[in-house]
């Protein structure tokens, strides 16, 4: 038969291990979110470079302003997403669910922007 102190020590040890695992999962999730944001930024940079390359053959009039506005909007959306993720981690992580439908929406918007740029480039050739 174990004493009350031994039982308490075992419970505290188990809680400590669970908290350690939770911290590890928080760190892994934050790392994955940071990597996802970095990859999105790299993808956006690649799209921007492609668009600039295609626009070099065109005159730089109103279309460049429209693309710059779209780029600013995309950067604002990424900043908002980063702020929401930061708030998520500041609140302790697992108390709030990630908003994956919004992330999917951002990816769809990025794909739509890419298709629009391709169509624009095709019209200018």
Image (cartoon, grey):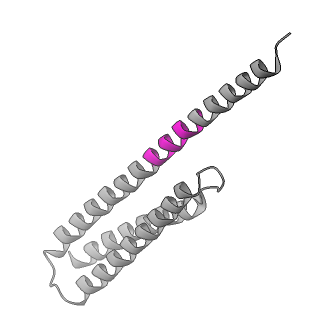
Query: Is 82 or 122 nearer to us in this picture?
Result: 82
Residue drawn where x is 59% and y is 38% of the image: 22
Residues 105 and 32: in front is 32
Q: 88 and 80: which one is in front?
A: 88
Q: What residue appears at the point 42 percent right and 64 percent down from the top-left corner? A: 111
Q: Determine whether, in the image, residue 121 is placed left or right of residue 11.
A: left
- Judge whether 109 appears above or below 62 on screen: above
Residue 44: name its quadrant: bottom left
**Image x and y of residue 4, in percent:** 82, 21
Q: Residue 64's image quarter?
A: bottom left
Asked if 32 appears above or below 24 in the picture, the reply is below
In what quadrant of the picture does the C terminus appear? bottom left
**In this view of the protein, which residue sits in the foreground, 59 or 10?**
10
Magenta stretch, main secondary structure class: helix
Chain part drawn in magenta: 21-32
**Is residue 29 within the magenta segment?**
yes
Q: Residue at x 66, y 26 (%)?
A: 13
Question: Which residue occupies 30% across, 76% down?
Answer: 120
Magenta-drawn stretch contains 10: no
């Amino acid at each position: 038969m174990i004493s009350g102190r031994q039982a308490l020590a075992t419970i505290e040890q188990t809680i400590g291990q669970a908290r350690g695992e939770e911290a590890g999962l928080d760190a892994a999730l934050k790392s994955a979110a940071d990597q996802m944001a970095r990859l999105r930024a790299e993808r956006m940079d690649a799209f921007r470079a492609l668009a600039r390359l295609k626009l070099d053959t065109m005159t730089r009039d109103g279309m460049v302003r429209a693309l710059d506005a779209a780029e600013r909007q995309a950067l604002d959306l990424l900043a908002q997403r980063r702020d929401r993720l930061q708030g998520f981690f500041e609140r302790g992580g697992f108390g709030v669910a990630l908003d994956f439908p919004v992330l999917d929406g951002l990816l769809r918007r990025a794909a739509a922007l890419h298709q629009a740029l391709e169509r624009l480039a095709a019209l200018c050739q």
